[in-house]
Amino acid sequence: MKPVLVLALGGLLAASAAWAAPSPARQEQLRHMVDQDCGSCHGLTRNGGLGSPLKAERLVDMGDEALTATILDGRPGTPMPAWRGLLSEDDALWIVRHLKGEGP
Amino acid sequence: MKRLACAAFALMLSACAQPQLRATGDLGLVVERADGALQLVETSHNTALGRITGLGDLSHASLVYSRDERFAFVFGRDGGLTKVDLLQGRVVGRVVQSGNSIGGAISQDGRLVAVANYTPGGVKVFDTDTLELVADIPAIAADGSRSKVVGLEDAPGNRFVFSLYEAGEIWLADLKDSKAPKIRKYTGIGNQPYDALVTEDGHYYMAGLFGEDGIAMLDLWNPDAGVRRILDHYGKGQQPLPVYKMPHLEGWAASGTQAFLPAVGRHEVLVVDTTTWREVGRIPVAGQPIFAMLRPDGRQMWVNFALPDNGKVQVIDIPSLKVVKTIEPGKAVLHMEFTPRGERVWLSARDSDQVTVWDTETLEKVAELPAQKPSGIFFTARAHKIGL
């Protein structure tokens, strides 16, 4: 594994080792945010728009870490912003699992 | 004719004993994005008249009106183009014309409706009477790649103008002969045009660039002059902030020689001098502006915001360029629409499931209407405006 990736993973693994699922109320907010706010660019049905499709079958092969990093830090050169100012690492990981159909 | 009058009548009252005529000039539609539905509303008494369902995925949906203000053409995210009859309160035509689309425009003569598509990237043009395909314009750039189409607008001369997101091109399509569109392509106009507008007078097409700072401007009175760049600092600037939601340029309007633009990712509205196309001021506001819309008389501007400030709306006094009031009309305010002469403004609050109506002079709320996850609000007066 490349050093950069290890570094990036390191931080997240530490976080995920102590991963605390967001509270039920927060989960409800996040579910709503995914549908409505992410949906503005990625589609209410997650079929994509200006942003990529976010269908579970498309995401399952991607690592949780990479996807969490995309949510928190955005994708430079695209309109995908860094959501770190509004979402915690736990929030982002919950969203990744939710999108993959693994979460509640 | 009889059936029509009865249907219209049935919408208003319960019986159909005597046909009652109904005009459409005070009607409008509110998009209920999560349900694939529209609410039919009227602005003379601030009431809902009915609900129209079966329009598919309406995330980021928009619509245009026929020149007689009777029909709406609704552009859904799922590629659906739906024709709605306001008098009958129902869908009268629907085609799923692509996999993924983002708005459209109606031609000057009212005979053509054009849809901007993401997948496959391009523009399709339909007959407004029959919804039959008239022209198909794939957005294949100079380098052979296919682009998403954004910022599709109508222009005088039965033309449509649009931008190619990935390729960074502006295309001007002349559909005077709708079977054989003449397309003029402007390449290298800038990185990632994401939205555009045509000025109210039909003179300029302006595309905001996401990939760099600035606006690409085409003079529609003089298309031979090519695309020029204005407001080179317009955009994210030296220290880009996360842009939680793309600003919309459609609300642009000029008041005298001043025009107003939502800054990209910054808590400011920019003031632009339309004689020099230079920035002449900035108005600090409560969040990242999405729409900065002028009241029809240009005396006042209403601004809504991206997350996390999307529960606020600010009213700016144009002569002083100062915020005069901050209101909280509900959670996730997505859109604002003025009545044709501007005495009222309707605001949609998605997460409060309501639309509120405000008096623009007293700045007080005068009505509330329940709506399911409302987004865009569109009044029929748009039928007679260039670029809407």
Image (cartoon, coloured by chain):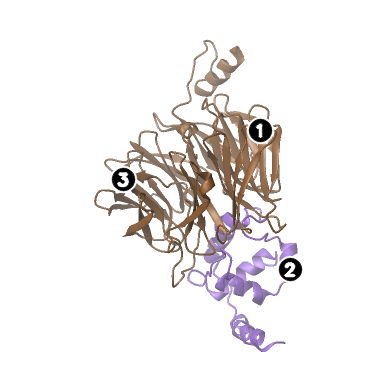
| A7 sits to left or right of B296 | right
Q: Nearer the viewer, mark 3 or mark 2?
A: 3
Q: Residue B199's spot in the image, x, y percent?
A: 45, 43
Q: Is residue A90 visible?
A: yes
Rounded to the nearest angstrom, the CA distance separating label 3 from label 2 is 49 Å
Q: Callout 3: residue from which chain?
A: B
Rounded to the nearest angstrom, the CA distance separating label 2 from label 1 is 46 Å
Q: Residue B34's spot in the image, x, y percent?
A: 59, 47
**Could you tell me if the residues under marks 2 and 1 are in contact, i.e. CB atoms within 8 Å?**
no
Write down the residue under mark 3: B300
Amino acid type shown at disc 3: Gln
Q: Residue B123's spot in the image, x, y percent?
A: 66, 44
What residue is shown at x 67% (from left), y 61% (from top)? A54
What residue is shown at x 71% (from left), y 58% (from top)? B145
Q: Callout 1: residue from which chain?
A: B
> Looking at the image, which is closer to me, B374 or B95?
B95
Q: Of helix, strand and loop, which one carries label 1?
A: loop
Amino acid type shown at disc 1: Ser
Rendered hue of chain A is purple
Query: In the image as oriented, which residue stretches furthest toward the top?
Result: B18
Write down the residue under mark 1: B178
Q: Along the polypeptide, which appears first: circle 1 or circle 3?
A: 1
> Looking at the image, which is closer to me, A1 or A18?
A1
Shown in brown, the chain is: B
Q: How dense is the environment of label 2, judged by Cα within 10 Å: few (below 14), some, or many (20 and up)?
A: some
Amino acid type shown at disc 2: Val
Q: How dense is the environment of label 1, judged by Cα within 10 Å: few (below 14), some, or many (20 and up)?
A: some
Rounded to the nearest angstrom, the CA distance separating label 1 from label 3 is 40 Å
What residue is shown at x 50% (from left), y 22% (from top)? B12
Q: Where, by quadrant of the figure, is residue B17 drawn? A: top right
